[in-house]
Image (cartoon, rainbow, N blue to C red):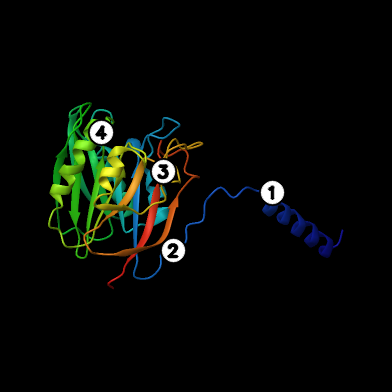
Amino acid sequence: MNNLQVAKRLFLFFLCLTVISPVNAEEIEPKEMNSLRIMSYNVRNCKGMDNVTDYQRVADVINRVAPDVVAVQELDSATERSQGVFVLKELAERTLLYWTYAPAIDYQGGKYGVGVLSKEKPLGYKTVPLPGKEENRALLIVEFEKYLFCCSHFSLTKEDQLLSVPVIFEAIKGIEKPLFLAGDMNSVYDSLPQIALREKFRTLNNYKENTIPVVSPDRCIDYIYVYENGNACSVLKRQVLFDEQVASDHLPLFVDVRFLNE
């Protein structure tokens, strides 16, 4: 067999591999100039569907999206369950992002709550307690130069979810900067809590793209919203990462937005 025949066979071999090999990773395009990429991810304390706690695996998901800001839910801080690890700080170190944490409850010698990761260093933040019969919940409000970003993880009970809405409205009353809210809201789009939230918020992600369970998802309970306070923004892109089926029990999602007054 001469060199030309060998080259042809190698070409055909690699061509076959290209055709039959599945493309596992969804394409994520870089964001456009002068846009903001917002991500939300319930990471289940970085314990995957294989019952392995893997901080790097979750960090890789975040790094793959390359967001400007991330709302992160289900985070231990120095608990027995996490063997003393401050989970959000661990993720921040692996993604090279700033972290802001809001503990909701005391748990196993430490804390449990929600957090925000961001490229930009926050100007400040505050935590607002939210109702929850099974466990207390929290709203984290983080301020940046041009906008505010809120993260929450709503209660499992509809009554507490409804009670949380006016608390949020009061906490953000009078804010003039653009404001976003993201998180695991434990409620579907047509539920009463979601209808109540939409009195002042607009849903930015596609609620018809389900986020749970990770395999054959059948409902959307994770959302990204913008506060309707006169600061209009356009949605450039929105995506749920349906291929991320191991790192957590929720699918990650993100939206790209641009402020219309810029």
Mark 4 belongs to which amino acid?
Ser
Q: Quadrant of residue 231?
A: bottom left
Q: Which residue is mark 3?
A: 57
Question: Could you say where residue 77 lies in the image, as x and y percent from the top left?
Answer: 22, 37
Measured as percent of width and height from the top left, residue 119 is found at: 28, 59
Q: Earlier in the sequence, mark 4 or mark 3?
A: 3
In the rendered image, residue 219, in percent from the top left (x then y), is placed at 43, 38
Q: Amino acid at mark 3?
A: Arg
Kindly report the distance in space between the C-alpha atoms of the residues bearing marks 1 and 2.
Answer: 27 Å
Whichever of callouts 1 and 2 sits on the residue coming sooner in the sequence is: 1
Residue identified by numbered label 4? 155
Indicate which label's residue lies in the foreground, 3 or 1: 1
Residue 188 seen anywhere in this rendered image of the structure: yes
Q: Looking at numbered disc 2 in the image, what kind of residue is underneath it? A: Pro
**Residue for badge 1:** 20
- Left or right side of 93 for 177: left
Is 197 placed left or right of 58 in the picture?
left
Q: Residue at x 23, y 26 (%)?
A: 134
Camera-nearest residue between 21 and 5: 21
User: What is the secondary structure assignment of the residue under circle 2?
Assistant: loop
Q: Secondary structure at mark 3?
A: helix
Which amino acid lies under the numbered mark 1 shown in the image of this protein? Ile
